[in-house]
Image (cartoon, helix red, strand yellow):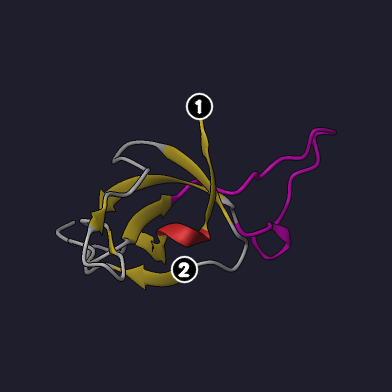
Amino acid sequence: MNIQPLGDRIVVKPLEAVEVTKGGIVLPDNAKEKPQEGKVVAVGKGKVKDDGKLVAPEVKVGEVILYGKYSGTEITTKEGEEYLIMREDDIFAILR
């Protein structure tokens, strides 16, 4: 993948949805919920404030994040890999 996000945008690889419930029930593809966790694969330079100063993003490549259910824009690469491009404001937390 060769994507460089601009500004405060971040490229995220969503983690796989759970296929089996805690009770052991296997879920079909159409019953799975959209994942809300993902791994950061690329980060833009940051957000430019009104006074012209650049604020670096808080997240770094490789971190696992929690984001909103319908956040970001879904993209598919030529290789068939799916990613999300979202603003840093769409991220709720960094999971450690």
Q: Residues within 10 Å of mark 1 (few under 14, many from 20)?
A: few
The three-letter amino acid code for the residue at tag 2 is: Gly
Q: Is residue 33 magenta?
A: yes
Q: In the structure shown, which secondary structural element does the residue marked by tag 2 occupy?
A: loop
Would residue 27 be found to the left or right of residue 51 on screen? right
Residue 96 tag number? 1
Q: Residue at x 39, y 36 (%)?
A: 63
In x, y percent, where is residue 35? 59, 53
Residue 72 tag number? 2
Q: In the structure shown, which secondary structural element does the residue marked by tag 1 occupy?
A: loop
Query: Which residues are drawn in magenta?
Result: 14-34
Q: Residue at x 80, y 41 (%)?
A: 25
- Please, is residue 8 above or below residue 73 in the view? above
Residue 46 tag number? none
In x, y percent, where is residue 92? 57, 50
Would residue 44 be found to the left or right of residue 12 on screen? left
Marks 1/2: CA–CA distance: 22 Å
In x, y percent, where is residue 79? 23, 62
- Please, is residue 21 above or below residue 43 in the view? above
Q: Residue at x 21, y 67 (%)?
A: 52
Quadrant housing residue 18: top right
Main SS of the magenta segment? loop
Quadrant housing residue 10: bottom left
